Image: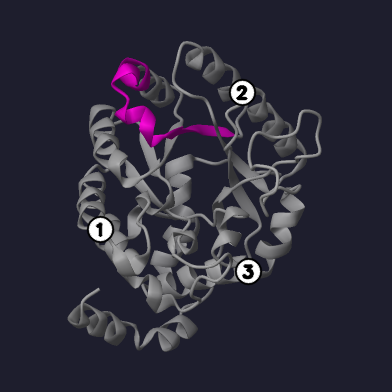
Amino acid sequence: MNRRRFLQTTAAFACLPEMTQAAPPVTRIIDTHTHFYDPSRPGGVPWPTKGSPLYRTVLPADWLAVAAPHGVKETVVVEASPLVEDNQWILDLAAKEKSIVGFVGHLDPGDAFASNLKRFAANPVFRGVRWSGTSLQDTAKQDAVLSGAKALANHGLELDLNGGPSYLPHAAKLAAGVPDLRIVINHLGASGDPRSLRPEWKESIRAAAKQPNAFMKVSALVEQVKCDYGKAPTDTTYYLPVLDHLWECFGPERLIYGSDWPVSDKGASYDVVFKVVDEFFRSKGSEACEKYFWKNSLAAYRWIERK
C-alpha cells in the first residue's frame, strides 16, 4: 500500500468507532464456513493431519462455545475431506444438530458425480458442493466440470470454489457459461497478506465480480497474514486493502460471512475474526450488515430453517 492510499484509508476509517456504536446489531448471523470432524472415530480423518494443532475433535458444541457469545448460532458446514462417505457423516451430524442450517459437500467432478449428487441432494440440508479451483484449470476435466456445474444448477444447488487466485478467471468463465449456477468463491480468492496484494489478484477479483451469479465469501481473512500461529493483527485497518477492494467489486449484495473456524485459529481467535468484519460492515450501515451476515448467504446457499 502506498503512502497516499494508506492516508486515504486511515482517514476514511477514523470515524469507524462512532459509526459502529451507532449501528444496531444485526438480527441474525449465519457463519457459512465451519469444519467439523472427529479424528477419534473409526478410520480417523484424512484432514487435518496428525500433529497439527487442528488435529482434535471439532463439533458444533465447540464452535458454539466461541461463536455464540457474538450472537452466531447457525452455520453452513463445508466439507474438506475427499471421502464420499464423510458427506454422510456430516448429514448424520446435522440430523442431531439444529445449528447446522446447510452443508456444502465434497464431491469431485467425475464419473460418479451425478449419482453421488443425486443421493446427497435428497437431503434438504445438502446445499451444494465444493471443488478445488485446480479442477477448473485441468483441461482433462473440462467436460466433467461443465457437466457437473449444470447438474448442480439443475438441482438448485450451488458451487463453492477454493484455491489460489490463478483459478479466478476460470471461475468467471464458468459463471458466465452456467448463469443459473450460484458460485461462491472461498477465502477471498486467496488474496494474500493485505499489505502486499498482487495486481493480478485485484484484476481477477474484478473479472469474477462482473458475473452476477458469483458471490465472495469473506473468510480466511486472518489466515492470509504472514505471521506466527495465532498472531495476526487485531486492528481492522490492517485488512482494509482487501475489504475495500471486495466491497468495491461485489458491493453489499454478494459478500458473505464465513469464519473458516477452526482453521481460522492459525491467524487469530474467533473473537478477532468476528470483530474485524463486524466493524467493517457496521461502518457500511445496518442494511449492509443484514445482507452480509445472513441475507446474502440465503440468496447464495438457500439454507433451510431448522426447527
Query: Quick check: marks 2 and 3 in contact, CB under 8 Å?
Result: no
> Mark 2 or mark 1, which is nearer to you?
1
Q: Residues within 10 Å of mark 3 (few under 14, many from 20)?
A: some
Instruction: Please provide percent x and percent y for residue 267.
Output: 54, 64
**Vertical arrangement, residue 15 with respect to residue 118, above or below:** below
Residue underneath mark 3: 70
Q: Earlier in the sequence, mark 1 or mark 3?
A: 3
Which residue is located at x 31 percent, y 46 percent?
Answer: 165
* Amino acid carrying mark 2 in the image: Val
Q: Tell me the CA gap for discs 2 and 1.
A: 36 Å
Instruction: Please provide percent x and percent y for residue 174.
Output: 28, 31
Q: Earlier in the sequence, mark 2 or mark 1?
A: 2
Residue underneath mark 1: 198
* Amino acid carrying mark 3 in the image: His
> Mark 1 or mark 3, which is nearer to you?
1
Foreground: 159 or 252? 159
Total count of labels: 3
